[in-house]
Amino acid sequence: MTDRPIKVLIAKPGLDGHDRGAKVLARGLRDEGFEVVYTGLRQTPEMIATAALQEDVDVVGLSILSGAHMTLLPRITKLLRDSGLEDVLVTAGGIIPDVDVTALAEVGVARVFGPGTTIAEVADYLRTNARPRD
Amino acid sequence: MAEPAATTGGPAARAHDLVLAARDGDRRSLARLLTAVENRTPLAEPALREMYPLAGAAHVVGITGPPGAGKSTLVAALIGEVRKAGRAVAVVAVDPSSPITGGALLGDRVRMQSYAGDRDVFIRSMAARGHAGGLASTTGAATAVLDAAGFDLILVETVGTGQSEVEVAAAADTTVVLEAPEMGDEVQAIKAGLLEVADLVVVNKGDKPGAQRTAAQLRAMLVAGGGPKVGGDPSQARPRPKRPEVLITTAATGEGVPELLVALDRHRSSSATGPTDSARLARADALVWAIVAERLRERLRAPDQSDATRVTLAAVADHRLDPYAAADALLAVLGSGSASPARD
């Protein structure tokens, strides 16, 4: 019962149209044995929180390259907490300056993966840190 | 976690709390129950035991067809139409699992994300996890959970299917087979398989050239041999293919979708008036036999029996014992009462 695949939501909040990275990661995590729910471009915080809740995912991975991460990511983590999803692991990837990483950690973004991160690194991190399954 | 009382009791008590909350409209509890069922956790059995008798009111509609025919887009359009009528709708969208890694990319939600603010729309993706019939082995149980949670309509979207993934017909009250224009000639339409189980055939992408022609071909070929025989004793008749209505939709624009919903409702009311609903009987059959098989496996692998089971299987692997004799031997062990009494 404990060997069930980890379920991950990959979403792109905000308005930038650069979804290649999110798609490569979604595909890469599939190849690492994860069940990946991919929701596509231009997701509002509400869409992401609703999908995380309905899908009962273990991890929410947010890809953002627009520069709006300090606005959008805290809204998403707040919505997740308000929905009772405080045990869901939240990670981010994209173009996020180092100076923002600490502030994001404070609002519940556990890890920020910058350019050059390998899929294997992400997969290992998720396997180690995703919430334990029932 | 969201329900403090639930973390203290055993599986049955925790399942009970989740069921109460889900029936009360708590979507997080509903999502957790679906996970329990999908992962076959210890909560699954007590939850389903409680929910199954509460289910049965929903109209379960299966949507199947080849990859790229527009199943997800049509489901998204149907959600909109159903919500105009004020009915609560749930979706179970199944995508394939990798046979190599067990991973899956569940991408059906992409087209359904605009209903995030509507609590009467609930969308759940499922990986098929190696099950071959176009659904996951737990899809039927998941629809029962959504049914008991009070959804009026449950749309079950299969993986993109080929010609013979007909399992959805047993999982749904109404089966919709989606085709795209110009997908094949008339011979494709008269081959056995998927089209035979359709209650409704929908030619999607109706704005593409050839849609009318494809629909006309399907109508001609499906009607030609199908339908109940006129006269004679119906009990003597061989099972006959259905005689599905053929509709045209353009899911991307919504054209034809209101007509599809009307046809779905009509099929529902026509099939619900019969003496026994064959789709529901088939579903009960599949549900119960799956549990019987699972229980047998559980008992044969229980600590007191697993060594003997392994020896028998090894004898078959070495061709010292034939598989029929092995099965009889294993069943005889269970029948002789060496197995522990049933738990309930």
Image (cartoon, coloured by chain):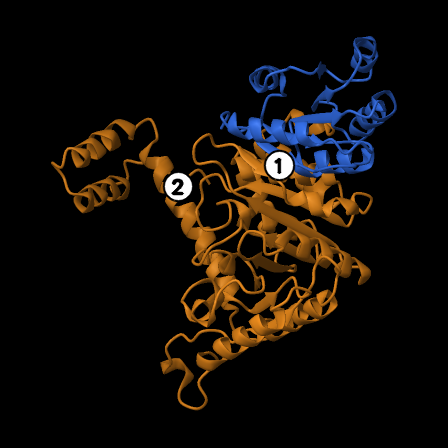
Chain colours: A blue, B orange
Q: Are marks 2 and 1 in contact (CB under 8 Å)?
A: no
Callouts 2 and 1 on one subunit: yes
The residue sitting at the left extreme is: B320
Residue shown at the point (71%, 21%) measured from the top left: A93
Task: Provide residue B220's location: percent of width, then percent of height.
Answer: 51, 79
Tag 1 residue: B15
Q: In which quarter of the image is the N terminus of chain B?
A: top right
Chain letter behind tag 1: B
Location of residue B39 in the rendering, given as x and y in whole percent from the top left corner: 53, 35
Against A108, is A26 above or below? below
* Residue denoted by label 2: B295
Q: Mark 2 lies on which chain?
A: B
In this view, which residue lies farthest toward the front?
B209
- Relative depth, front residue between B183 and B337: B183
Q: Which numbered dot is residue B30?
A: none
Q: Quadrant of residue A27?
A: top right
Q: Which amino acid does label 2 sit on?
A: Arg
Tell me the quarter of the picture where residue B100 sits.
top left
Residue beneath the point at 68% across and 51% down: B90
Quadrant of residue B209 in the image?
bottom right
| Image location (x, y in percent) of residue B278 | 49, 67
Mark 2: which secondary structure? helix
Amino acid type assigned to the residue bearing label 1 in the image: Ala
Q: Residues within 10 Å of mark 1 (few under 14, many from 20)?
A: many
Q: Residue at x 61, y 75 (%)?
A: B270
Within 10 Å of the Cα at label 2, are there few (<14), some (14-19), or many (20+) other Cα atoms?
A: few
Front residue of this view, candidates B194 and B148: B194
Q: Is residue A134 visible?
A: no
Between residue B95 and residue B250, name the one nearer to us: B250
Local SS, label 1? helix
